[in-house]
Structure formats: structure tokens, C-alpha cells
Amino acid sequence: MDKLFLGAAYYPELWEESELEQDVARIKAAGLNCVRMAEFAWGRMEPKEGEFHFGWLKKIVKKLYENGIYTVLCTPSATPPRWLFTKYPETRMVMHDLIRADVSSRCHTCKTSPVMREKNRILVTKMAEAFAGDPAVVGWQIDNEIYPYNEGCFCEHCKAAFRLWLQEKFGSVDALNKAWGMARWSLSYDSFEDVMPPYPRQWRHPSLRKAWREFQYAQVKSYVEEQADVLHAFGCKNVGTNMMQHNSMSYCKINEKLDVVQYNHYDPASALADTAFGYDFVRCVKDKPFWVMETQVGWNGSEYAEGGFRPAGACYANTMLPFARGAQMNLYWLLRTHPNGQEMAHGALYSPAGREYKVTEEVRRAAADLKKCREFLQNTCVRSEIALHYSSTALNSFESAPLVKGFNYRAELLGRYYSAFRHYNVDVIDTQHGLSGYKVLLSPFLAVVDENGFYERVAKWVEEGGTWIVGPMSDIMDGNVRRYTHAVFGFLEEFAGVYVKYQRPIGNDVFRAVWENGGECSLSVWYDAFECREGTKSLAHYTAGEFAPFAAVTERKAGKGRVILAGSVLSHADILRLVGLPPIAEASENVTLTQRAGKESGVIAVETAGTGGSLLLGGEYRDLLTGRTLCGKVGLAPYEALVLRRMNDPNGRQI
């Protein structure tokens, strides 16, 4: 990690040129060293077709750099100018009601349109020619929060491309019909030409819905990679695309040919502790420092303010937490509140009149503190012995067929599992990610296990000594959102050594269970009852309802490791009981801990609830932010961060 960047989105095209000097002074006054620019400035760069103007932008980039401020440049393909849409109407996406999108917002382009792609290529080439090799440009962002909005584009180009995509995937329409089970309700297609997109407001086939999303994501991926190829051809470094925190469009796939994972979030202060989930995920996509490209400063807003104002100190904690978890960059949205148009109600570091908000003081404080601990952050990294699966395939499968009313895969995974690990290092991974180095792997709600060679890899990892805690709702369908017919699970019955006697996706108060070695085992959401085969033992069994006395949690040894199968959602305490590893330290529930290791070692603690908390240290540490030497029980003020460098390593060496 060569440098840490703290900055904001800056839109100089909205302001008079005479304001540049003052904006530079504002950026420096806030303690920032980076800005993100040009994401919506296509109209300024190419006001008429084939007429390119970059002099204004080069002047600003240079001025910023002369003042110690780096630039992330953005390709503006999210907002082509009106002349392009007028001359080439096919570049506008078609909504699900078959009406072309209005030219009144953003992200309204068709990602399949050959004309749109060609115009993108030309502009990005011109940008790369103008800025490649410029030391002021530290990286590139492609498009903005790119995603198939409104369930994608329904134009004729996209329909034809979708059919071709299906043909390449399945080979024949008979294979598609079989994979999707289209004989049901006499839905079988006679040819790929019969396939229509799943229009909203109809009862849509789950397999069709998932396939349509996967196709749209594939179009986005190639749309991004075409621009990345141009930038890479000119030697541009740190190319990425800023994405929101869902994993519906696979982070692993979209970042396959990109250099740095870029991430946006606007979590309210009340969810600050849960924000770390996104950091623990994007850090693992490429196993390297990630960039937070957007996060709120004071409050969210578009036509009106929303999300609640951040209490005093919350912005500071929201700034320190991503760096604790492995970020290299954190950018706020935005530097100055827009004076007109959409999003005038959004918070910023400065008002439209250029005046500071109170929260700007917190940004200045965070910038100063990051300088104090910069060397420690550069010399250490986050290493985890525990991994938690967050699967793009599972997310899309449950979106198409939830099975449980109101089931939200990401929310359930975060609230019922990830939140148990506030005092642990945890890697949040998709199924493509390697398993080497982990002692424990948790795979709840992993609907599809048969992908990315995961069957074979996890079996080998368990045999070599890993503990796999899997279920509930795992291995229950294939990649086409089709339930298995040969068994309840794809392979878990055999691998875990059980027979699923009963299964219920609906919970009620009659289901109770106890651990075999004593104590209540809490259950919720989903219920599987197991008969244990030879070599498998029950860890907990049902004591009430029709499932008694069958097993609710089982364990089977496999080689040097073991597989633990959970038939229901367990409490945080019971999950940690199965994991069996100690926390980083004892701390209040509202204190998030991160252990850092490398040339140095230590712990970063962030209080996330604004109520104050405590931490129990098992040795002497130096707080790099205050210079204090701390040991034993340590108090944290509301939203305080402690960056604690260990005074002695395990071998007694002074650090």
C-alpha cells in the first residue's frame, strides 16, 4: 500500500472557473488528498460529435496535483450528452413497459447497443490519450454504479442477444426446457426465438428470471471490460468500477479483468457496525486493498434529505473503519452540495455557497489521525482464519425463488451470521475464492454448491483439516433454480453422513432443540431433521414438534477435518460455540475489532453505536492516535477509534 487516500467527488463542470482556487483551498482545508472527477462530464468533454475538449480538465488536474491532491478520473458512460441520444435513439434503454428511457437522469444507456459501445470506445480512447502517464492521475473509475437498472433493457438488441446467450449456454432448446422444467404448465419452448424476457408484474418463471439477470450482468461485464481494455492499452493503472454493496452482479466476475475493487455504500449511522460486512467482502475479491469511492458525509438525499443525520462522531468512525478493514482509499460524496438539478438535498463537506458543515471538522480530524497511523496501516494487513460465504449465485437464486416468505439473503446472512463476529477477523468470500489458510468456513444459505469446482475443493479442504459449518438452506438447488430430485441435497447427505427425514421452510413455536452436552439450542427460519448414518453424530436434537427426536445439528469427521451440518438458523452464541476459536479480545458488543499483522501487529477498535464502550487488552499497546500506552480494560468514547500497536510481539521483541 504505497499511499492512503482520503477525498471526495468533485464536479468542477458545475462551477465557474473562478471558483477553482477556492475549491482547492477547501479541499486542503478539509485535509483531503484526492478527488474523483469527470464521471458525468461527457457533455463538457465532447459537446458536439467528434469535437473533444480536455484542456479544461487537464488544467484542473494539474492545479490539484500542484497542491498535493491526486485525481481519480472517471469514464462518463453513465451520462452521454443529449446530442448522442437524439441522433442515436437506440442507445437509450427500453424499459419493461417497452418505452424508451427519458433523457432526464443517468444510467439510462443500452449496454448491448453497438453504437453506444462504439461511442464509449472513442471517448475513452481520447481520455486515455490525454491523461495516460499523468502522475496526478492515481486511478480510473469506469462508468458509475453500473447495474441493470429497472431489471435491464428490453430493446430488440437485448432480446436478440439474450436468445443468443441462452443458445450458447444450453446448446439446444430441448436442453433449456429440461433444465428449467418447462413441461410444467406446458411452457416448453419450440425454439429460442420463443423466449421473451420476464416482464415485471407477471408471475415469472424463476429460472427465466435468474437467466435474464445473468445475461444483463454479462452485458455489463463486457461493457466495462471494453473500456478497461482501452485504458490498459494506454498503460493506465488502477482501473476499476464503483459498485454498490449488493453481490447480485458478481463482484468476482465484474472485477476479473480490473485492477482495484471499488465500492460505494450509504449505510446510516445506525448500521455502522454492519458496514464492515462490505469491507470484509470487497477486500477478498482480489485479496488486496480496496477503494471506497462513495460514502455519505452528513446525510443522504436526492429530492429530499433522508437516512438521518449522522450524530457527532459517526462520520469520523465511518472514515476510520474502512482503513481498519483494509481500504487504501475513502472518498466522500460529495465535496460541495449541488446547486441545482437532482440530489440538491444530499449532504456534503461544503454547502453550495462553499461554507463548511459541522461534519467537515470530523473529516479534518480523521485526515490528521490517518497520518498518525499511516505507517502502521502500510506495514500490516487483515488476515483471517474464518471465512463466511456470500454467494452471488445464492443471492440471485433466492431473489428468483425465496422459498421462505420475506427472505432476504443478504440481510439474513449479515444479521444472523456475520454480526456474531464483531470481535473476529472474518473474510467474506464467494465460492470462487480459495480456502487455503482458513480453519473454519461457514456456508449458511448457500443455495447452490455445485459451481466453480467447489464440491471437490471443499471436500479436499475438510480432509486436510478444515471445519465446514454448512446450512441451513444450502445445497438445495442447482444453478437453474431447480430443486434436486435424487435427494434433498445435491451432495450434502452423503458428505455429511445424514438422511433428511423432514424439512420445513416455515417456522413456528413448536420447534425446540437442545445440545447433546447440555443447554438449549435456539432455532429459526428453516428446519431440517436428520437421521445420522454411521460415523456421524448428533450435536443437537429436536425436543418438541413432529421432528423430535431427530438431529438438528450433526458432525462427521472427514480425514483431519469435520463437516458440521446445521438444519436451522442458530443463535450467535451457538454459532461461536461451533466455530470454537477465541475472539481478538473481549469487548463491548458495540465495539468492532480488527486484528492487523505483518511487519508489526496490533488491534484497531472502533466504537460504532455512539454510546461508548470498552475493550480488554491482554498486553501492552501504544495508541498511535494519542500516544498513550494502554493495557487491561480500556474505555472508548462514543465513536472513538483506537489504533493499537502491540508493544511486544509474541517472542518478546520490542516493536
Image (cartoon, helix red, strand yellow):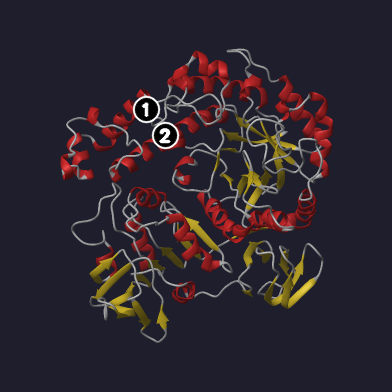
Q: Determine the CA span between mark 2 and mark 1.
A: 9 Å
Task: Give the percent coordinates (x, y) of residue 401.
Answer: 32, 51
Query: Marks 2 and 1: CB-CB under 8 Å?
Result: yes
Which badge, 2 or 1, comes first in the chain's sequence?
Answer: 2
In the rendered image, the residue lying farthest to the bottom is 518
Q: Residue furthest front?
A: 304
Left or right, 601 with reference to 226: right
Q: Which residue is mark 2?
A: 152
Q: Which element is circle 2 on?
A: loop
Q: Secondary structure at mark 1?
A: helix
Q: Amino acid at mark 2?
A: Gly
Q: Report the front residue among 136 and 448.
A: 448
Residue nearest the viewer, comparing 245 with 138:
245
Q: Is residue 654 visible?
A: no
Image vertical order of residue 13 relative to residue 612, above or below: above
Which quadrant would residue 345 be assigned to in this image? top right
Residue drawn at point x = 44 percent, y = 53 percent = 430
Q: Splitting the image into 4 quarters, where does residue 53 fall?
A: top right
Q: Nearer the viewer, mark 2 or mark 1?
A: 2
x 59%, y 69%: residue: 423
Three-letter amino acid code at the position of disc 1: Cys
**Circle 1 is placed at which residue position?**
158
Instruction: Count neighbours of disc 2 (C-alpha within 10 A) and say few if under 14, some if 14 to 19, many if 20 or more.
Output: many
Location of residue 55 in the rendering, given as x and y in whole percent from the top left corner? 72, 20
Query: Residue 424: where, in percent of width, then height?
Result: 56, 68
Q: Position of residue 610 (x, y in %)?
A: 69, 64
In the rendered view, tell whether residue 239 sits above or below residue 102.
below
